[in-house]
């Protein structure tokens, strides 16, 4: 006897419901061209560009680095899936690459390849982890409105801090060792995960 229910895969796609779930919706399409407005496509493209620029500006205002992690971004029953933030030091791709070049760090699997950041990133992370005695150190792309080449050398994220966070004295010692090794005086902060900025 056939089932009375309808499987989700058999139901027609409700485009209105899907569009409501999108984080950013483009403005509705403009009417077709008329004799009064022959440049309607150009105007529509320009309007969409302006709308996205305004949306991106609002995102940038909300995603500045934080000195402390607000409660709404901590994992709680009220907020079980907040956006990911990483606690650590901000470094650019060029700075990480210069550090790897200075110490001749490279991935063993590609000994004859020209030196680039992709070859250097894993050995750099391994060296820093060994130096401070923290096996869960990570390098995460940071959200930045001005550059796609910034990374966080992160001690932990808001998802891992409950398991990985150590005492304040140990944390300060690890931060100081990283600052010395990476030749920076900047304070560690909470940075937004750049792999999913929107």
Image: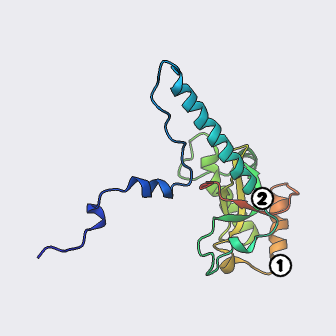
Q: Position of residue 176 (x, y in %)?
A: 85, 66
User: Residue 79 is drawn in which quadrant?
Assistant: bottom right
Q: Residue at x 85, y 60 (%)?
A: 180
User: Residue 124 is drawn in which quadrant?
Assistant: bottom right
Q: Position of residue 51 (x, y in %)?
A: 63, 41
| Residue count near mark 1 (Cα–Cα under 10 Å), binned few <14, some 14–19, many ≥20 | few
Nearer to me, 31 or 134 = 31
- SS at mark 2 in the image: loop
Q: Residue furthest right?
A: 185
Q: Is residue 118 left or right of residue 179?
A: left
Q: Position of residue 172 (x, y in %)?
A: 84, 72
Residue labelled with disc 1: 168
Sooner in the amino-acid sequence: mark 2 or mark 1: 2
Residue labelled with disc 2: 65
Q: Residue at x 27, y 68 (%)?
A: 7
Q: Position of residue 127 (x, y in %)?
A: 70, 61
User: Residue 131 is drawn in which quadrant?
Assistant: bottom right
Q: Is residue 76 left or right of residue 26?
A: right
Q: Image quadrant for the C terminus?
A: bottom right
Tag in front: 2 or 1: 2
Nearer to me, 165 or 109 = 165
């Amino acid at each position: 006897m056939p089932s009375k229910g309808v499987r989700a895969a058999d139901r027609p796609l409700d485009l209105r419901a899907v569009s409501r779930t999108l984080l950013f919706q483009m403005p509705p399409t403009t009417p077709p061209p008329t004799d009064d407005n022959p440049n309607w496509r150009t105007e529509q493209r320009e309007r969409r560009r302006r709308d996205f620029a305004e949306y991106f500006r609002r995102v940038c205002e909300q995603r500045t680095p934080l000195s402390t992690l607000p409660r709404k971004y901590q994992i709680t029953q009220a907020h079980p899936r907040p956006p990911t933030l990483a606690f650590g030091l901000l470094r650019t791709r060029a700075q990480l690459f210069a550090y790897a070049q200075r110490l001749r760090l490279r991935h063993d699997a590609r000994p004859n390849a020209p030196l680039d950041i992709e070859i250097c990133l894993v050995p750099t992370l391994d060296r820093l982890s060994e130096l401070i005695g923290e096996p869960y150190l990570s390098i995460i792309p940071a959200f930045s409105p001005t550059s796609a080449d910034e990374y966080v050398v992160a001690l932990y994220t808001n998802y891992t801090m409950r398991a990985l966070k150590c005492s304040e004295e140990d944390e300060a010692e690890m931060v100081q060792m990283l600052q010395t090794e990476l030749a920076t005086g900047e304070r560690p902060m909470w940075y937004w995960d750049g792999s999913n900025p929107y």
